[in-house]
């Protein structure tokens, strides 16, 4: 199976740079009190441990399509940069460089959006472009497969999967929908919000139980606050990587002005394999793919590069497919014969920077009171897809598995 790879840079791959505020309107008089918010691009720093002594230029596009060149410089302090995308607030023209403490950058997708109509759905495909059996037997088979899953590593009993995506993309709804399938009725286990700001503020791990809540499965879905919550509520790159590395304790509440540190309450200094994230599932809303801000693609690319450097495989969930295709809204079995969904899968792949083979469409339960076997099959197929890539992590990081490879190689 194809293994995902990232660029060579890890979290320490971003070399130390000075904190600054780059303005697109550099020719404005000093007495000017405000600039167009669309032409402001902030680059901040957050103090962390990894360093890099390479001198590589970073190019960033400004609001008026000018470019600014930021040269890496060796510094005594250990710092790493992250991006803050254009916000909707107006900033003073005489803004000065921020200190490393005050310039906490967020992984954000806040940017003016333009409404684009969905393309008119053409005739549906003659056959499914992915083979799926829409039967009660298939649902039962998938439930058995998920319920009986055990990681291929003796050190852990559960695969921890982190759901990561923009606000209101359907992360919490997916968790509730999966648990609903096993409960036999629609339940909202993970609290779901509907505003432009993230309802989830802390790290929450949901252990998925089997049929009738009897036994725990080997799957844990981890929920975290959404990307793009704005200037004061977003996550930092370092926060996300700390979660994946297993440093962040369960229930930790994220704060924009207090990044995760070794001094944070409950910080896990030496995380074991069971504390870490074993697979990342990006979640994007199909009905917003065409209106997501351009900066979000850069955010995803940046995240994927660092996550890949940690050896963690990534997949993606395309949610709200019923909102873009009327036929699929009426009948979920039409998902893989819908040209518009097939096209949107390609656009999601471009946004995330990954092949569509890693992406699966899902329909979460929202207003329904009862289950639907076809919706269940689609949800369970997504879970089975995730577990396949989570298990690749264990194969790559299990000493016993590695020793077997070494023996076979030397034989």
Image: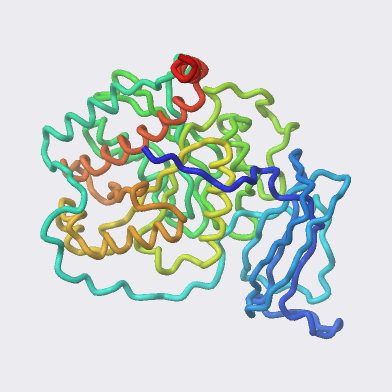
Which residue is situated farthest in the front direction here?
A: 411
Question: Is 100 on the left-hand or right-hand side of 87?
Answer: right
* Total count of labels: 0
Residue 321: x and y in percent read 28, 57
Applied colour scheme? rainbow
Q: Quadrant of residue 61?
A: bottom right
Reply above or below: 302 against 267. Answer: below
Q: Residue at x 65, y 26 (%)?
A: 268
Please tell me which residue is depicted at 24% across the width and 25% down the height of the picture: 211
Residue 342 location, quadrant: bottom left
The residue lying toward the viewer, choosing from 115 and 183, is 115
Q: Where is residue 223 drawn, in percent x and y?
A: 48, 40
Q: Quadrant of the C terminus?
A: top left
Where in the figure is residue 350, as x and y percent of width and height?
Answer: 43, 60
Above or below, 162 against 271 in this view is below
Q: Is residue 304 above or below residue 159?
A: below
Q: Residue at x 49, y 72 (%)?
A: 113
| Residue closest to the far right | 76
Residue 45 horizontal/vertical position (percent): 75, 53
Q: Is residue 95 above or below residue 337?
A: below
* Residue at position x 67%, y 29% in the image: 267
Locate the N terminus by quadrant.
Answer: top left
Which residue is nearer to you in this view: 241 or 400?
400
**Viewed as shown, does residue 275 lie left or right of 376?**
right
The reply, left or right, for residue 276 in relation to residue 292 is right
In-front residue for pair 67/159 = 67
**Which one is nearer the viewer's eye here, 276 or 215?**
276
């Amino acid at each position: 199976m194809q293994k995902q790879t990232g660029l060579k840079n890890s979290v320490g791959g971003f070399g130390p740079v000075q904190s600054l505020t780059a303005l697109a309107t550099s020719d404005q008089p000093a007495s000017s009190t405000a600039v167009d918010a669309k032409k402001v691009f902030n680059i901040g720093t957050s103090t962390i441990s990894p360093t890099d002594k390479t001198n590589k230029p970073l190019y960033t596009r400004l609001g008026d399509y000018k470019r600014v060149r930021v040269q890496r410089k060796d510094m005594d302090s250990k710092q790493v940069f992250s991006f803050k995308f254009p916000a909707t607030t107006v900033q003073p023209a005489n803004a000065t460089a921020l200190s490393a403490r005050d310039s906490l950058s967020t992984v954000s997708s806040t940017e003016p959006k333009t409404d684009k109509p969905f393309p008119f759905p053409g005739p549906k495909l003659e056959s499914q472009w992915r083979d799926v059996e829409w039967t009660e037997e298939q649902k039962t088979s998938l439930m058995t497969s998920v319920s009986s899953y055990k990681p291929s590593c003796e050190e852990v009993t559960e695969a921890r999967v982190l759901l990561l995506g923009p606000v209101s993309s359907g992360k919490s709804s997916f968790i509730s929908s999966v648990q609903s399938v096993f409960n036999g009725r629609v339940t909202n286990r993970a609290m779901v919000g509907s505003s432009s700001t993230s309802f989830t503020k802390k790290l929450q791990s949901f252990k998925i139980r089997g049929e009738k809540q009897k036994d725990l499965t080997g799957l844990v879905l981890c929920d975290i606050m959404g990307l793009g919550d704005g200037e004061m509520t977003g996550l930092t790159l370092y926060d996300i990587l700390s979660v994946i590395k297993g440093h962040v304790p369960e229930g930790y509440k994220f704060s924009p002005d207090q990044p995760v540190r070794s001094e944070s309450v409950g910080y896990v200094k030496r995380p074991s394999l069971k504390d870490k994230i074993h697979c990342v599932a990006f979640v994007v809303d199909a009905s917003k793919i065409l209106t997501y801000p351009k900066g979000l693609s850069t955010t995803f690319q940046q995240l994927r590069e660092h996550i890949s450097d940690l050896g963690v495989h990534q997949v993606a969930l395309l949610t709200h497919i019923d909102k873009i295709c009327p036929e699929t809204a009426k009948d979920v079995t039409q998902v893989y014969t819908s040209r518009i969904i097939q096209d949107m899968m390609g656009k999601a792949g471009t946004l995330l920077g990954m092949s569509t083979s890693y992406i699966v469409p899902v329909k979460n339960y929202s207003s329904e009171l009862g289950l639907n076997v076809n919706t269940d099959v689609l949800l369970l197929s997504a879970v089975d897809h995730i577990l396949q890539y989570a298990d690749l992590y264990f194969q790559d990081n299990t000493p016993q598995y590695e020793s077997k490879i070494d023996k076979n190689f030397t034989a």
